[in-house]
Image: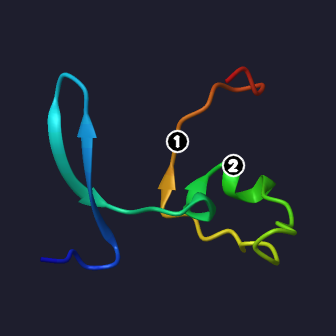
Amino acid sequence: MALPSDEQILHISGVGFVHCKKIRQNQIAPTCFDLAVNPLEGGRLEPDPLVTLPTEPGGNQ
């Protein structure tokens, strides 16, 4: 049995198993715009925001 490449199953303590979509670090705004070059894996992931996390004005995260 295999999941599609964009899905995963997580185990969360106290909750149980959760079937959800995968998301990459370059798909989470606003931090996707701060990613730098990764010399180990090569290149820089271009921002492709699919999810935006709310942050406080002024950067007090």
| Residue in the image at 75% along x and 73% along y | 41
Q: Is residue 15 above or below residue 30?
A: above
Give the quadrant of residue 57: top right
Q: Between disc 2 and disc 1, whose residue precedes?
A: 2
Q: Residues within 10 Å of mark 2 (few under 14, many from 20)?
A: some
* Residue position marked by numbered label 2 in the rendering: 31
Q: Is residue 44 above or below residue 35?
A: below
| Residue occupied by mark 1 | 53
Q: Is residue 24 left or right of residue 42?
A: left
CB under 8 Å between discs 2 and 1: yes
10 or 25, which lies in front? Answer: 10
Q: Label 1 amino acid?
A: Leu
Mark 2 belongs to which amino acid?
Thr
Asked where in the image residue 23 lies, by quadrant, the reply is bottom left
**Residue 61 location in percent, x, y?**
67, 24
In the visual, does 55 lie left or right of 46? left
Q: x, y (%) of residue 13?
A: 25, 26
What is the distance, in whole Å, between disc 2 and disc 1 at their CAs? 9 Å
